[in-house]
């Protein structure tokens, strides 16, 4: 029984890595669509979000079946509950990538943000992509050093997010209202993407170290 | 054993009702703080969010303990898993109320949005408050007619959310960039608040009817 359970946990982990890999591809495509004005890539991201949703729902079914059949307790139980929460966060990360792609599609053939903000969004997108790739590795290897890196990267995203508002609210901002709206939403989506990654990283750290993390962190 | 389990489920339900009640108070206070420029009320909401987080974390612990001790299967298991998800959504609704309150505090003693948008936000806030109160009743009574009402109310919030963008992007908009940023964020927070309520309503409908709802809905 124990051996079957370990195999099933390995299957859960593998699926989380797969979903995280899809998310990493989506944020890479979404930020490229956003920064390079590529409507085909934006539509790809929007389509791919259904795959992420389906994969997350399948993983949830697997996790619930494991709970029912294996009746895990103590740490084993918390691992399975954590998997459900990680799946929910990955699903939301996919949504954020989709929202970024949608902004890019709405504005096509224009760029989403004015020139003065583009370097900021290129950087924020690059950090989000780096975070997503580290998350794949973290889920694969449970190397907690990566969790620490993700937290540091999130600090960078937060600083860039604030710098967007500094620019938009600064005296030199010449954007129209639509530029302000887009910059606000795009920045929020990039920031939330990173937040969800931090929340997952904390849970993986728990899996590795045994410290339980409440759901809202 | 079965009787104990039923008692524990009743306890879970009671706690969900309690958390939803806190959330309803918070959104009521947050929208009043927002619309009436009341910084004390805004600070109350920000403080109260810690209570909501703590109550949600306690409920999660209870649910996980029930899983460990009672080892529920089939529908019973799904009820407990649903409770964990409902708790996570309530916690996020509390965050949205807090974000709305924060916007109001940042802008104090000014109002957050210019005159032309105030009626829209008063209406959006009122619908969010109505949704939150219906959610309390839905969790208490499992009356699925309320789930339907919440979905209809969410459609109203979505329409108001779109109307904010119509105004902000319209030719008569005279707001500064900061007004545009605030209106965008405030509208997004109101809309997300309602989305989470719909997601909970779907799960309660499952509890009442037996149809399983994937986590991302």
Image (cartoon, coloured by chain):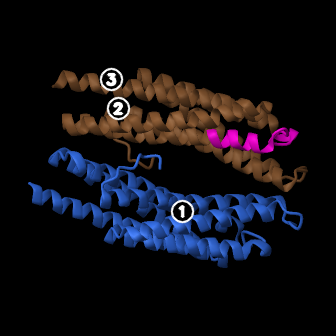
Chain colours: A brown, B blue
- CA separation in Å, label 1 and label 3: 37 Å
- CA separation in Å, label 2 and label 3: 13 Å
Q: Are the residues under badges 1 and 3 in a single subunit?
A: no
Region rendered in magenta: A98-117
Q: Position of residue A95 (x, y in %)?
A: 58, 42
| Quadrant in which residue A121 is drawn | top right
Q: Nearer the viewer, mark 2 or mark 3?
A: 3
Q: Are the residues under badges 2 and 1 in a single subunit?
A: no
Q: Position of residue A202 (x, y in %)?
A: 44, 37
Q: Nearer the viewer, residue A54 or A75?
A: A54
Residue named by callout 1: B194
Label 3 marks a residue whose chain is A
Q: Are marks 1 and 3 in contact (CB under 8 Å)?
A: no
Residue named by callout 2: A207
Q: Nearer the viewer, mark 2 or mark 1?
A: 1
Q: Is residue A179 magenta?
A: no
Instruction: State the quadrant of the N terminus of chain A.
Output: top left
Q: Are marks 2 and 3 in contact (CB under 8 Å)?
A: no
State which tag comes first along the sequence, 2 or 3.
3
Q: Are the residues under badges 2 and 3 in a single subunit?
A: yes
Q: Position of residue A53 (x, y in %)?
A: 49, 38
Q: Main secondary structure of the magenta part?
A: helix
- CA separation in Å, label 2 and label 1: 33 Å
Q: Determine crowd level at label 2: few under 14, some 14-19, many 20+ residues with C-alpha closer than 10 A.
A: many
Q: Secondary structure at mark 1?
A: helix
Q: Determine crowd level at label 3: few under 14, some 14-19, many 20+ residues with C-alpha closer than 10 A.
A: few
Q: Position of residue B213 (x, y in %)?
A: 39, 50
Q: Residue furthest bottom?
A: B36
At 12% from the left and 59% from the top, the residue drawn is B4
């Amino acid at each position: 029984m124990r051996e079957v359970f370990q195999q099933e946990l390995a299957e859960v982990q593998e699926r989380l890595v797969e979903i995280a890999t899809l998310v990493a591809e989506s944020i890479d495509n979404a930020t490229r669509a956003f920064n390079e004005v590529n409507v085909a890539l934006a539509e790809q991201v929007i389509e791919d979000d259904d795959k992420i949703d389906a994969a997350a729902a399948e993983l949830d079914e697997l996790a619930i079946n494991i709970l029912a059949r294996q009746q895990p307790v103590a740490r084993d139980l918390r691992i399975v509950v954590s998997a459900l929460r990680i799946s929910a966060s990955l699903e939301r990360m996919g949504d954020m990538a989709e929202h970024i792609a949608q902004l890019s599609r709405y504005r096509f053939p224009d760029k989403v943000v004015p020139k003065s903000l583009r370097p900021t969004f290129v950087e924020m997108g690059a950090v989000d992509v780096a975070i997503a790739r580290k998350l794949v590795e973290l889920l694969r290897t449970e190397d907690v050093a990566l969790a620490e890196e993700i937290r540091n990267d999130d600090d960078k995203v937060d600083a860039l997010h604030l710098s967007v508002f500094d620019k938009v609210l600064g005296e030199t901002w010449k954007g129209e209202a639509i530029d302000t709206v887009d910059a606000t939403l795009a920045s929020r989506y990039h920031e939330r993407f990173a937040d969800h990654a931090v929340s997952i990283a904390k849970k993986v750290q728990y899996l590795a170290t045994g410290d339980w993390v409440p759901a809202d962190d």
